[in-house]
Image (cartoon, rainbow, N blue to C red):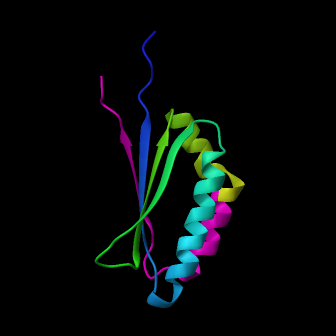
C-alpha cells in the first residue's frame, strides 16, 4: 500500500524590533508542543540573519489530517493569540505536499 505524502507547512512571521525575543520564545514553545503531537516529525524555527525581525517556521506532518488537527489544537490557537500583538504583519501560511518518490 503506498504511503500518503507528507505535508510541509511553512509560516512566515514578522516581529517588531522590540518584540523579537518574545516572538522567538513563543515560536520555540509552539515548536515543543507541536513536536509532541501525533504526526509531527519536524518543527524548526528559523530567524533571518539579515533581518532578525523575520522568522520562518517549517513543520513536517505525516498527513494532511495531522496538519489539520494541529491547526485546530488548543496550543496552536493559543500561540496565534499570543503572537498576534507581537507581530507587525499577519503571518503567512502555506502547505506543500511532498512529491518525493
List x then y, in percent, for residue 95: 40, 47
Where residue 60 sits in the image (x, y, percent)? 47, 42
Question: x and y percent of residue 9 in the render?
Answer: 43, 49
The stretch in magenta equals 76-101
Q: Where is residue 39 shown, x and y percent of the image? A: 58, 36
Q: As rendered, which of 9 and 65 lies closer to the eye?
A: 9
Indicate whether 67 appears above or below 31: above
> Image point 46% across, 9% down: which residue?
1
The residue at the point 59 percent across, 71 percent down is 25
Closer-to-camera residue (69/6):
6
Identity of the residue drawn at 58% across and 51% down: 71
Q: Which residue is outermost to the bottom?
A: 18
Name the side, left or right, on which 36 lies relative to 21: right
Image: 1 above or below 64: above
Name the residue located 42 percent from the left edge and 78 percent from the top edge. 89
Please check the rendered image and state whether residue 95 is part of the magenta-colored stretch, yes or no.
yes
| Residue projecting furthest to the front | 49
In the rendered image, the vertical position of residue 65 relative to residue 12, given as above or below: above
Amino acid at each position: 500500500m503506498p504511503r500518503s505524502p507528507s505535508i510541509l507547512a511553512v509560516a512566515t512571521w514578522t516581529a517588531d524590533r522590540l518584540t523579537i525575543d518574545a516572538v522567538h520564545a513563543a515560536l520555540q514553545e509552539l515548536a515543543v508542543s507541536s513536536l509532541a503531537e501525533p504526526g509531527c516529525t519536524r518543527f524548526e524555527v528559523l530567524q533571518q540573519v539579515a533581518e532578525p525581525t523575520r522568522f520562518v517556521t517549517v513543520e513536517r506532518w505525516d498527513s494532511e489530517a495531522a496538519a489539520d488537527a494541529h491547526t485546530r489544537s488548543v496550543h496552536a490557537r493559543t500561540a496565534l493569540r499570543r503572537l498576534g500583538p507581537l507581530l507587525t504583519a499577519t503571518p503567512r501560511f502555506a502547505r506543500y505536499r511532498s512529491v518525493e518518490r
